[in-house]
């Protein structure tokens, strides 16, 4: 419909809506990686029991070479899969867009995030584990020492004024006239910032399982593990743009500390597991859509119960987790301390009933969650939902299986995340839902 005037904008597509779209186009030049995990396992008698020994060495190398490219557009909102680009003019008839494009950049994000990454991350880690089986006790412990390095360079206007603004004027269509959109052309500045730092950390875990009877046991475990941060640290306060080193040595690694303990029961086709847990988690991260950096800690405590019962052809597996989580520390945004983390429901659950006959299996899978907050300010809630899936599998002959699977049978709209922390004045919240109802069928032949 190029060139046609929208005479009645209020009735456009039956909803009168236009959308400001930002296309995030990532050019992945290389995500090459190589990983090597060498280990030796053995066991030997020890103090009337058995001692299992594992030792090894882990090594990996990961490239992150990519460019972040953006273009903005104004489009119709349509439910027929035919959203169209729309040109906008001022009341005086001056074009605001060029073929529906207001800027060849992230115009609606403040022209941010035009970036180039050329990075290499290397990690080495020796590790060892001991497991002792002695009477009613099973005791194990493990150590792992990670050390690595980050090398490379980045470019982008988000580095600061010294590295270039990243916005220029360019005649995109080559017609000799510079339009409003062509005054908002994002480029990746030539000036690059180095990345050059090393890191190391120790992970460990220890646990014990005590068998009360042949069908019951108690267990406990304490662990500390780490995750080395990578490209999400860049363009933020943790990296010195002049040297490529860390301004905060603690930013290189986020740690998780967890204590758990519980009870196990298994007998005659019935099993039950109950686990109480406490965890403290660190996070340093970056969110592109909101331009926010995170430097915070969380505490979470709760209980997880899962079990299974099987009687003849019928079986039921089910489980649920209650989590009480809190943001305990936020360096950059102390106002959210004490709040529940975004998208963290208090209770999640699942159940799978199933009937198995000789050549036919029929079952369902139910997954559910209670409500959770859209953002860390704890204002806007995303409602809980229950998703029901079902499956049928028929074996008409040996080595032949016909199956039909239904996903989200009741076509539930389950909101999993939302950008806004409160309903804005325009009443529009950007959100994402689980996939609607889908049905699939398959035939499998075995040889």
Image: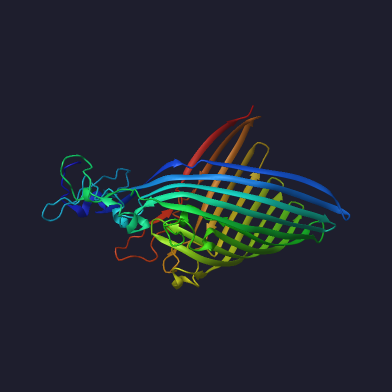
Please, is residue 172 above or below residue 351 in the view?
above
Q: From this view, report whether residue 145 is shown above or below residue 28.
A: below
Q: Measured from the top left, where is residue 85 in percent x and y?
A: 25, 45
Residue 120 seen: yes
In this image, 113 relative to 223: left or right?
Answer: left
Q: Position of residue 296 (x, y in %)?
A: 50, 66
Front position in the image: 208 or 84: 208
Q: Quadrant of the N terminus?
A: top left
Judge left or right: residue 361 versus residue 80: right
Q: Pick whichever, 20 or 394, lies toward us.
A: 20
In percent of the image, x 15 and y 47: which residue is there?
5
Q: Is residue 311 left or right of residue 300?
A: right
Q: Residue furthest right?
A: 48
Q: Which of the colour schemes (rainbow, by chain, secondary structure, one colour) is used?
A: rainbow
> In the rendering, at what x and y percent does residue 44 appear?
84, 48
Residue 162: which quarter of the image?
A: bottom left
Whether 366 is drawn above or below 358: the answer is below
Q: Give the percent coordinates (x, y) of residue 440.
A: 50, 39
Residue in view at x 54 percent, y 63 percent: 282
């Amino acid at each position: 419909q190029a060139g046609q005037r929208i005479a009645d904008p209020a009735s456009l597509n039956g909803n009168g809506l236009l959308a400001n779209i930002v296309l995030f186009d990532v050019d992945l030049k290389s995500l090459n990686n190589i990983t090597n995990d060498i280990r030796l396992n053995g066991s030997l008698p020890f103090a009337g029991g058995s001692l299992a020994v594992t030792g090894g060495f882990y090594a990996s190398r990961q490239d992150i070479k990519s460019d972040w490219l953006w273009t903005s557009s104004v489009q119709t909102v349509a439910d027929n899969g035919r959203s169209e680009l729309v040109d906008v003019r001022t009341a005086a008839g001056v074009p605001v867009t060029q073929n529906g494009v207001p800027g060849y950049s992230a115009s609606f994000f403040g022209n941010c995030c035009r970036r180039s990454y050329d990075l290499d991350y290397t990690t080495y880690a020796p590790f060892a584990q001991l497991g002792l089986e002695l009477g009613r006790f099973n005791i194990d412990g493990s150590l792992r020492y990670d050390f690595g390095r980050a090398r490379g360079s980045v470019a982008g206007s988000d580095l600061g004024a010294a590295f270039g603004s990243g916005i220029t004027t360019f005649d995109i269509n080559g017609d000799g006239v510079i339009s409003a959109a062509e005054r908002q052309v994002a480029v990746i500045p030539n000036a690059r910032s180095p990345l050059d730092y090393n890191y190391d950390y120790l992970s460990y875990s220890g646990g014990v399982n005590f068998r009360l009877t042949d069908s019951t046991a108690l267990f406990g475990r304490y662990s500390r593990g780490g995750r080395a941060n990578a490209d999400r640290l860049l363009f933020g306060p943790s990296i010195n743009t002049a040297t490529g080193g860390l301004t905060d040595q603690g930013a290189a690694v986020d740690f998780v500390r967890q204590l758990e303990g519980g009870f196990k029961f298994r007998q005659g086709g019935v099993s039950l597991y109950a686990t109480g847990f406490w965890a403290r988690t660190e996070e340093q991260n970056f969110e592109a859509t909101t331009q926010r950096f995170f430097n915070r800690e969380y505490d979470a405590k709760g209980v997880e119960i899962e079990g299974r019962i099987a009687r003849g052809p019928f079986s039921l597996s089910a489980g649920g987790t209650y989590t009480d989580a809190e943001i305990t520390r936020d360096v950059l945004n102390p106002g959210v301390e004490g709040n529940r983390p975004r998208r963290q429901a208090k209770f999640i659950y699942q159940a799978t009933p199933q009937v198995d006959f000789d050549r036919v299996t029929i079952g369902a899978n139910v997954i559910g969650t209670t409500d959770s907050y859209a953002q860390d300010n704890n204002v806007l809630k995303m409602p809980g939902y229950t998703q029901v899936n079902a499956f049928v599998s028929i074996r008409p002959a040996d080595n032949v299986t016909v199956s039909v699977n239904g996903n989200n049978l009741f076509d539930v709209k389950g909101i999993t995340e939302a950008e806004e922390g409160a309903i804005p004045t325009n009443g529009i919240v950007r959100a994402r839902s689980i996939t609607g109802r889908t049905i699939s069928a398959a035939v499998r032949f075995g040889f």
